[in-house]
Image (cartoon, grey):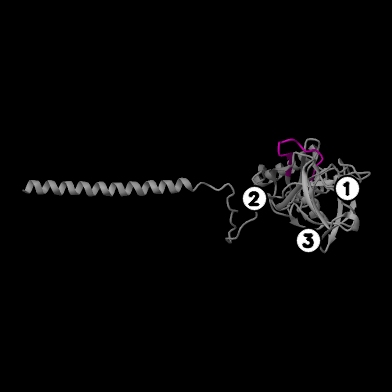
Amino acid sequence: MRQSSGRHVSVAVIVACAAIFVVMYSWLRTSESAQSLAVPSANPPSPLRADGGAADPVNLRTRTIAQTRSAPRWMPSELMVTVQTVAARSVPYAVVEGDCGVRGRTDAEGVFVGVVSAGVCRIQAMREDGLLRVWSEVSVVELAAGERLTLELSLPDEVQGGVGIAVEAHETGLLVVAVRPGSPAETEGLEVGDVVTHVDAVPTVGWSPRTFAANTMGPVGSLVTLRVEHAAADSGQASSVFAVSRIWLPPGAGADTKRGPIAVQSLTDAQRRELEAIRDEYLLLAADGALEPDHPDVVRLREQAQMLADRAATP
């Protein structure tokens, strides 16, 4: 009886242990599954500042080439911007513009190099497709003093076209003030005095002419739908909805897409070597401990950097 009782106790202990093992195994599997589902987001949240607020977005299409250690604020930063289409074709003579003083055109290879001050800079590229200006998305970069940074900006592959009409703001939409002769818009019966109330079913009340241009721009040959309130009594109907084919709009007379009124040109190779020499000499001074702001060599380098920036800003 004792042996039988002991045997029953052993079996009960084994069953209890097996049950515990099954529960623990199931819990571990569930935990692993939960972890496997928690994959990083394709659009991770913006990094946080020290105060816990959301920081400015950091552009991931940048790369630091070099950075001068402990560089003073006066040390210029060098920003190299490459403008390409989505299919990685270079965009020559594109405008590069930023709120940090950057404004210039890319060279024949689609590259612009500028001298900028340290800090955050919001930058765009623009291509002139005839009369239209095609902008890239805004990229935000933060440069440290003395840093050399590269940035890639993208523009559409297809040549962009418009609908061939000029508009101005109106209380019920956009008033047509000009129609290009021979354009699809004219063929559809659009006339001066008509009011465009919708573009692709979106109301145009409150739009500016620039907003209209941005929303009707697209690849040449593609369609955009307009809803129009007609002004002429003999049009046969008060309003109509029709699709208009986007067309190439040639630039105005005298336009030069390679050289426009741009204040800052890309750095020359000689200027980039000069900037590199300023950085290198500063590092030698740092190694010798001669970094007082009023040290004669530091003052000289600061003046050279300022003169270089001034020359780069002269077309």
Mark in the foreground, 3 or 2: 3
Residue 207 in percent (x, y) is at 79, 58
Residue 301 part of the magenta-drawn span: no
Q: Position of residue 123 (x, y in %)?
A: 74, 49
Using the numbered discs, state the Cα–Cα distance from disc 2 to disc 1 in whole angstroms: 46 Å
Q: Nearer the viewer, residue 92 or 79?
A: 92
Residue 219 picture location, percent across and down? 77, 42
Q: How crowded is the residue under tag 1: few (<14 C-alpha within 10 Å), some, or many (20+)? A: some
* Residue at screen point 86% across, 42% down: 257
Mark 3 to mark 2: distance in Å?
34 Å
Q: Give the residues in magenta.
A: 79-95
Residue that label 1 marks: 186
Q: Amino acid at mark 3?
A: Val
Residue 61, quarter of the rendered image: top right
Amino acid at pointer 2: Val
What residue is pinned by disc 2? 58
**Nearest to the observer: residue 129 or residue 109:** 129
